[in-house]
Image (cartoon, rainbow, N blue to C red):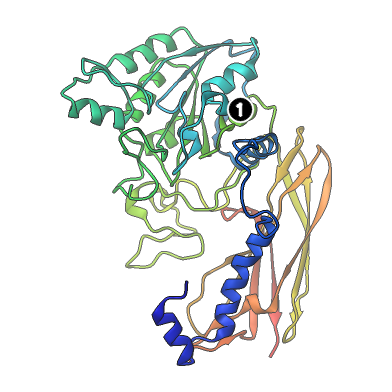
Amino acid sequence: LMRPWLEELVKEGKISEHRIDDAVRRILRVKFELGLFENRYVNPVEEVSAPEAHRALALEGARENIVLLKNDGKLLPLDLKKYKRILVTGPNANNQAILGDWAFPQPEENVTTVLEGLRQATDGLAEIVYSNSGRIRGKVAKDKIDTTDPVTQARLLEEGGEISDYSISDAVKKAHGCDLAIIVVGGYGIRSDWGLRTYGESADRPSIDFYGRQEELIRAVGQTGIPIVVVIVNGKPLNNEWTTRNIPAIVDVWEPGMYGGQALAEILLGKVNPSGKLPITIPQQAGQVPMFYYQKETRYSTGYALGSSRADDRPAYCFGHGLSYTSFEYSDLKMDTLITSGQNVRISFRVKNVGDRKGKEVPMLFVGDDVSSVVTPIAMLKGFDKISLCPGEEKTVNFTVSYNELGLWNAEMNYVVEPGTFSVKVGRSYDDIRLRGTFEVLE
């Protein structure tokens, strides 16, 4: 329904009917694509909860979007000949937090948790040892209990219970008999039976650190000397500085959905090569917020201090970051170098898989206006693609940047494309630029 004040603005000519038509057109387009004009109502007799096609899409989406943040010493993919007993623990190891914010709790058969995914994927080649460090939807007794899950802790204390060190000590005890630990931490957006969440609507907080005693759990298991893989389940940027510095392998699964546990297990064991990239910059700590890849630090901000040698100026992980189990080489950058009014910019380059595994790469194109009449971003993402390459395979990637995308709002609030040079950067992320060039827009 049109708001009364919006109707008045249209009548006064301050908002055009064309603008309203354009907004309505987008809504109708989605409804047409969903087939709602042909089949308006759902048939309640039909199976509409997680049909097979949706399950396949959920699994593929999780495989494509999980981000490998860190992999020192090439700990991943895991060698099951070397790691025969694997400890799995952490508050998100065996629950439905992977479903994400505003998801309804699902029947167990609809969700593959991280623990279940690892048990299935190892297929008896390694023993999975589980230490329960607190289940988000688990029943909480009123007597002494321990958990690293902050929601369970809060409810327990509210009911007069007492927190012990059982879960951390249990994980440490079991870690002594294992070759490697996978610790699944983070937060959760799915509503518990009493409504408390750590991310999602109305769940702001003053820190981007891990919740509760999760760092304590990671440190304690780390003191046993076994290698650790930390898996982060989250719906907003989280970073624990100690973990980022000291843990060799870190994986960000976001909210991977019903088959997130299976997709993660496939990546950890090398059955799927990770290819997800960060769509944001993750700061080291909350004091750096806001942090953008396209903005230089100023005297009055905590922006991304590009080129700074100070470690505390840098983000934990930059925009576009995401590792792979293979390596890629970029070459042969070509572009239109002289651009006349209305002309689009054609840019191409080649990407080659120089590693020994098949993998998917996400090349990114950044363009910045070198000199402008008003302040503009130092560079902006203008294109990206996802390509699959076998070992030794090479492909050409083509981007077209429209002339209009080179414009800015000038001091007179006119949208114009100003003549001058523009810098082009191509790479795996904003901190991993492989090719550079320039083109000029003519008068």
Q: Is residue 406 left or right of residue 232?
A: right
Name the residue located 43 percent from the left edge and 47 percent from the top edge: 236
Report which quarter residue 400 is drawn in: bottom right
**Residue 204 vertical position relative to residue 424 in the rendered view, above or below:** above
Residue 79 can be seen in this image: no
**Residue 25 appears at what percent x and percent y?**
62, 72
Q: Residue furthest top?
A: 177
Nearer to me, 257 or 336: 257
Q: Is residue 74 left or right of residue 188?
A: right
**Residue 304 appears at what percent x and percent y?**
44, 59
Q: Is residue 352 left or right of residue 117?
A: right
Please state, as top left, top right, bottom left or bottom right, where the C terminus lies in the image: bottom right
What element does badge 1 sit on?
A: helix
Report which quarter residue 261 is drawn in: top right
**Residue 36 appears at what percent x and percent y?**
65, 57
**Residue 331 vertical position relative to residue 223 in the rendered view, above or below:** below
Nearer to me, 37 or 402: 37
Residue 230 can be seen in this image: yes
Nearer to me, 279 or 189: 189
Report which quarter residue 258 is drawn in: top right
**Residue 405 appears at what percent x and percent y?**
64, 75
Q: Residues within 10 Å of mark 1 (few under 14, many from 20)?
A: many
Name the residue located 65 percent from the left edge and 79 percent from the top edge: 404
Residue located beneath label 1 in the image: 262
Tell me which amino acid carries mark 1: Gln
Name the residue located 74 percent from the left edge and 74 percent from the top edge: 345
Q: Is residue 45 left or right of residue 97?
A: right
